[in-house]
Amino acid sequence: MPAAPISLMSQSGFAITVAGLLAALTSVADAAPRPVTVFLERGGRIVNHQGEEVEIPRYGGGDAAWTKIVGCVQAQFAPFQIDISDTRPRGDHITAIVGGLASQLGLDDRSTNGVGPYMAGRIQRNATVYVFSKVGTGERDTQNLCAVTVHEISHALGLDHTFKCGDVMSYHGDRCGARKFLDVDAPCGEFSPRTCGDGNKTQNSYRMIANLVGLKNPEPAQPEPGDPQDPWTEDQDDQDDQGDQGDQGDQDDQGDQGDQDASEPCAEQDEQTEQAEQFVEDRRGRRYRMERVQGRDGRTWIVLHAVR
């Protein structure tokens, strides 16, 4: 399967694409909607990155700020069959690690606030995403950290970027108000519209997650309209979408997003889930296989094995 660029979140909350760091993931699409569990981890993690041990520190914004982040992420995913917890769950789950600097994993602190895996329309139930809380607006900006966390988790749920101001999957930040899942069909894209990674012309972020995991309160069937005139029309924000893009940061290789945004160093697996190997290429072109190892001291290690 061809690899696609990593999706990163810039310090202002915008996702950018970084060339040179690629991953190949294998996954199986879910046949029917099934609930998802997400673990928000604030305790840090030790990573073996390019042969060196790197410790991503625990989130340092304090208990009050952390509680706001957790509550905000829970509120964003509240309509869907997604359980958000900051207590480690059993079984398969997506992990969102909040803490540290992007530069600890060889990325640019000036433009990188988060990174997560993406496979078009596919849920990666054991993926790990990173939210670098020490960059950008910092560890006390709970609204931005919430939005970045939701954005990166949603990549692991199969969502692409949208070119729609106000949508949590867009690059437009909070210029149209607090970011959220919009129930609107919008083109995909970063700084200009493009075809979505699944081949469709548009993505409805709200409906796509609902179709993938299900709604907590299924919507009642709508009666047939008596008036042939549709009373609802999508609000247009072309001027917002086409506005000042000068501070959005640089990007490379924005083309084919059809298979995935690359991932963090590893994904958790248990005995009942599909085993999936992950690979990463460093900036010098060297390729590694990623493995998650549980040490005897109870710490989790993410190891990169060079591929000959």
Image (cartoon, helix red, strand yellow):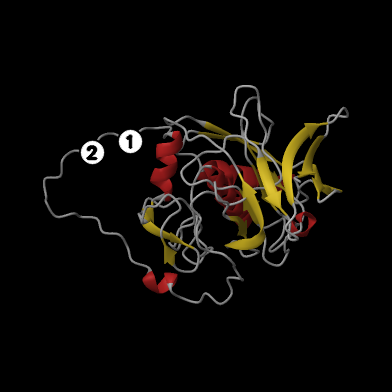
- Furthest residue to the front? 308
Q: Residue at x 42, y 34 (%)?
A: 214
Q: Amino acid at mark 1?
A: Glu
Residue 235 figure quarter? bottom left
- Give the CA separation, mark 1 to mark 2: 8 Å
Q: Amino acid at mark 2?
A: Gln
Left or right side of 306 for 83:
left
x, y percent for residue 89? 66, 28
Left or right of 182 on screen, residue 219? left
Q: Position of residue 132 (x, y in %)?
A: 71, 54
- Report how many numbered discs are placed on residues in the image: 2
Secondary structure under the numbered disc 2 in the rendered image: loop
Q: Which residue is located at x 70 percent, y 44 percent?
A: 97
Q: Are marks 1 and 2 in contact (CB under 8 Å)?
A: yes
Question: Quick one: 253 or 212, which is closer to the camera?
Answer: 253
Which residue bears the numbered disc 2?
A: 222
> Is the residue marked by circle 1 packed among few (<14), some (14-19), or many (20+) residues within 10 Å?
few
In the rendered view, does 189 fall on the left or right side of 249? left
Return the x and y of residue 10 as percentages of the image width and height. Answer: 63, 63
Q: Is residue 55 visible?
A: yes
Q: Residue 162's quadrant in the figure? A: bottom left
Residue hosting label 1: 219
Q: Residue at x 81, y 51 (%)?
A: 50
Q: Nearer the viewer, residue 240 or 31?
A: 31
Q: Is residue 227 above or below residue 269?
A: below
Mark yes or no: residue 57 visible: no
In the picture shown, does residue 227 fall above or below 266?
below
Snapshot quadrant of residue 303: top right
